[in-house]
Each structure stands twice: as structure tokens, then as C-alpha cells.
Amino acid sequence: MVIQATPELLRWVDDQLGRGCDPAEMIDSMVTVGHTRAFAEGMLGKASGKTRFKGSQAAADAAADALNEVPEPLPAPLASGTSTIVVDGHRVEILVNLHHPRIVVFGNLLTDAECDALIEASRPKLARSETVNRANGGTELNEARTSEGTYFFHDASPLLETINRRIAQVTRWPLANGEPLQILHYGIGAEYQPHYDYFSLEDAGTSTLLQHGGQRVATLITYLNTPEAGGATVFPDVGLEVAPIRGNAVFFAYESPTPASRTLHGGTPVVAGEKWIATRWMRENVYA
């Protein structure tokens, strides 16, 4: 997959170089999350001119060509024709693969230990969850969302770095194009009524939201525990219900910010026990 060299992405690369990051390590990291090596090398060179790459003219031309390639419009998990994806020795299963809309259910995306660690790291930080204020682009409390939660940036700890790099690889979307990982806790009766994750172009606050990486293009919801009853993720437009099973995850992409995407979804009320999830929203460009 090739992603366009947007101004935001170039600024991010330039900032990393300014901090003294090793260019070779930056290139390896970009390749890991789905970029071609030629694209990564060409982008670093274009960002600031601080980096010089050894190689033939053909390699230099390949880097330039990569910068002009048409970007993949949406995250695209490698799910067709395979039952597993292996990421750094960790085996992720493909349980459901729906094409229209694009919905993939992953098994064993996270280990039990990783799920437990995310839950414990989140407990001291939990606060009532908010939703986007459609009028001004801020956030507000909403009776449709009765969870509590917190969030972590991708480099908050070695654990977060490992998890987010795995997410980037299975979804084939750059790590830098994702919002912070949001951890949500639902008690008995808590739910999130059906909604869309994209920013509606009809809302006054959308222009503000789009300044931070552009439109949302996909969502990944990972289940950190298995509730005793309730708490499924439902997609009313396609009649799909995904059971909240610990370590599993549901991915869905929306090619247009309209109901035509058929990505209306919600979290059903928890009937018994509790529900913990980790949600990562993916943007068109670098999130900042």
C-alpha cells in the first residue's frame, strides 16, 4: 500500500528528523506499517533534504515515482484468501470477512496479558465518555453514550507501541494516521446507541475536526474482556452482530462520510458483568 506524501506527513517526518531520529530507523518503521521502502526514502529526502541515501539513479527514480503514486483510499486488511496474519511472530486469525461494507473480525488480535495490562493502566484515568459536538468540533456529554474511558498515545509505553504497530500492520494503514487508542469501560446497562464514526460534512464543527488529519476512514474495536451477557457490536444496516470476545476485534472502513457507507453501528447494553474495549480511529492523513 502506498500513501500520498501529504503536507502533514512531510511535516511529521521533518519534525522527527529535527529531533535527531535515526533516518534508517524511521524508514524501517514506515516499511513496517505498510509503506514501500522507496516511498519512505523519497519522503525523507523530500521533507527536509537532511538525509542522503546511497544507491543507484534507478533507486532514486523509484523513490521519486513512489511519491507520485495514487494512494490507497482506505485501510485494507489482508483478509481475502487467508485465515491468519502473522505479525512479528503473533498469529492473528480472520473470523469474518465482509466486503460491502468492508468489515473484518479478527481473532486473537491481542493476548490475554495485553488485554489485562490495558485495563489496569486505564482504571485510574477513567472519566465519563464524551461525543463530538457537531456544532463546534469540540466534545460533550451525550446520553446516547453511557460509558467511561480514557486514551493513550501510541508511544505512551512499550506495550502501546507494540499494540499500535500490530494494528497498523493488520489494517495496512500508517501508525501516524491513527488517533490515540481510546479505552472504554461499560458497566451494567451501559451502551452506545447506533451511530456513525465519520465526521458529517453537514455539521458546522467538521471543518475544525478535519484540520487534525482529515476525515476518519476506518475504525478498529478490540474487546479486552468477555462480558457475561450483552455488549455486542451491531451493524443494523447489514444485520451483523459481533460478539465481544476477549482479544478479538472488529474492523470496518467507510469509503464515504455518508449513510451510504452502511457503517451504522452501536454497542448493545451490558446485561451482566462489564465490558472493556480499545478503539482506534484511522484518519486520511497524519493525526496531529
Image: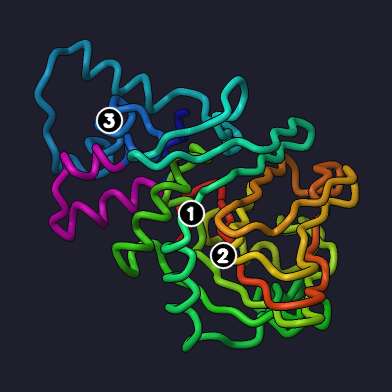
Please give the name of the residue rendered at 14% of the width and 43% of the height, measured from the top-left corner.
Answer: 50
Q: Main secondary structure of the magenta part?
A: helix
Crowding near the residue tagged with mark 3, few <14, some 14–19, many ≥20 C-alpha atoms within 10 Å: many
Q: Marks 2 and 1: in contact by CB < 8 Å?
A: yes
Whole-Å distance between the Cαs marked 1 and 3? 33 Å
Please give the name of the residue rendered at 35% of the width and 63% of the height, measured from the top-left corner.
Answer: 159
Task: Tell whether 38 sits left or right of 99.
Answer: left
Q: Marks 2 and 3: in contact by CB < 8 Å?
A: no
Residue linked to disc 1: 110
Task: Tell whether 125 sits left or right of 36.
Answer: right
Say which amino acid is labelled 2: Leu
Region of the chain picked out in magenta, as a range: 8-29
x and y percentages locating residue 129 in the rendered image:
66, 81
Earlier sequence position, callout 3 versus callout 2: 3
Task: Tell whether 64 sits left or right of 259.
Answer: left
Earlier sequence position, callout 1 versus callout 3: 3
Element class at badge 1: loop
x and y percentages locating residue 207 in the rendered image:
66, 62
Q: Against 77, is 206 above or below?
A: below
Q: Does the magenta-highlighted stretch encompass residue 14?
A: yes
Judge by depth and name the residue closer to the eye, 232 or 198: 232
Q: Quadrant of residue 27 in the image?
A: top left
- 3 vs 2, front mark: 2
x and y percentages locating residue 131 in the rendered image:
71, 75
Please give the name of the residue rendered at 73% of the width and 70% of the height, measured from the top-left corner.
Answer: 228
Say which amino acid is labelled 1: Leu
Say which amino acid is labelled 3: Gly
Residue linked to disc 3: 42
Earlier sequence position, callout 1 versus callout 2: 1
- 1 vs 3, front mark: 1
Residue linked to disc 2: 224
Q: Does the magenta-highlighted stretch encompass residue 22?
A: yes
